[in-house]
Amino acid sequence: MIVYRGLDDVRLRPCPAAVAVGNFDGLHLGHRKILSKLCGLAEKRGLRSLVLTFDPHPERALGKKSVRMIDTPDKRLERFGDTCVDAVVVMSFDTSFSRLSCPDFVYRILADKLGAREVVVGRDFRFGRNRRGDTARLRVLGRRIGLAVHVVPPAVLDGRVVSSSAIRRLLGRGRVGEAARLLGRPYEISGHVVRGRHRGSLLGFPTANLATASELLPEGVFISETVRRGRIFRSLTSIGTNPTFGPHPLSVETLLLDYRGSLYGAELTVRLLRRLRPLKKFPDSAALGAGIGRDVDAARAYFLAQG
């Protein structure tokens, strides 16, 4: 997969393409429906499959809403790399771009710059200055130049529309199991291990403290899997402010249940599988150690039941 950094990337040459447009934060089940349609069209018509996406998120760029992203920009590209997409254009969403008229977006960007012959979008797609363009407007403009427009209905799971907003809400409430169903996979937090306060080691539970760029950090104690160099370890992860020892900055600490050795500097990915409990302030270190022991037992029982 080729990644183009904006429309002025010197490697970008317009060639006949099927183009999907969107933010694709989290690359959830609804997004995968769009990409499946995109790649099917590209294969059928002999076109390149291309995604146009944005960084930063349009609502964040315009200061209208504080949006916490499900994936970092790098993680989003990594996920695209695991799909059928041939190329991704990451467009800088700035004031100038936001002021493009609807015709300019369709004719100058999609048709001229990207060589679009087929365009694939979701039902709620909006474009152009002040979000004036919708899918009906896109079809009208596309028809004038022979640009076919395909609107993909949303994915629905258990009567709920799958969307990035719904997933963000679930993660904000710690409901990682429900979020995983909409994502089609467990929610992940990636980062590198840094030195902490060694309290876990003193209690007999050495944890790895993760420095992460992830923006959505649901608080609580979670049964998890931790991936290091392609190996998966069963783990227990705490996300929060360490209330037993007085408020600290939000931290991510993971305990690999069957790992011995140093992890400092290691790159880890933590997959949150199930929330065990909310954070709790224990009366002292001994009570905290006993609580962690119970959490470890619960995690081991969970993995044993999973087989």
Image (spheres, rainbow, N blue to C red):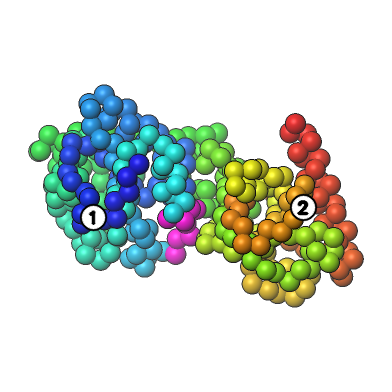
Q: Is residue 202 visible?
A: yes
Q: Judge whether residue 69 is colored magenta.
A: yes
Residue furthest to the front: 261
Residue 75 as seen in the image, left or right of residue 247: left
Q: What is the chief secondary structure element of the magenta stretch? A: loop
Residue furthest to the left: 144
Residue 218: x percent and y percent? 62, 57
Read off the residue under disc 1: 9
Q: So how many labels did they put on this image?
A: 2
Instruction: Tell me the element at label 2.
Output: loop
Residue 264: x percent and y percent? 66, 62
- Which segment is the magenta one? 66-73
Q: Quarter of the image containing the C terminus?
A: top right
Task: State the image quarter where residue 244 is shown.
Answer: bottom right
Residue 155: x percent and y percent? 44, 35
**Residue drawn at (80%, 43%), measured in percent from left and top?**
300
Task: State the image quarter where residue 180 is shown.
Answer: top right
Q: Looking at the image, is 113 positioned above or below residue 204? A: above
Q: Amino acid at mark 1?
A: Asp
Q: Judge whether residue 268 is colored magenta.
A: no
Q: Quarter of the image containing the N terminus?
A: top left
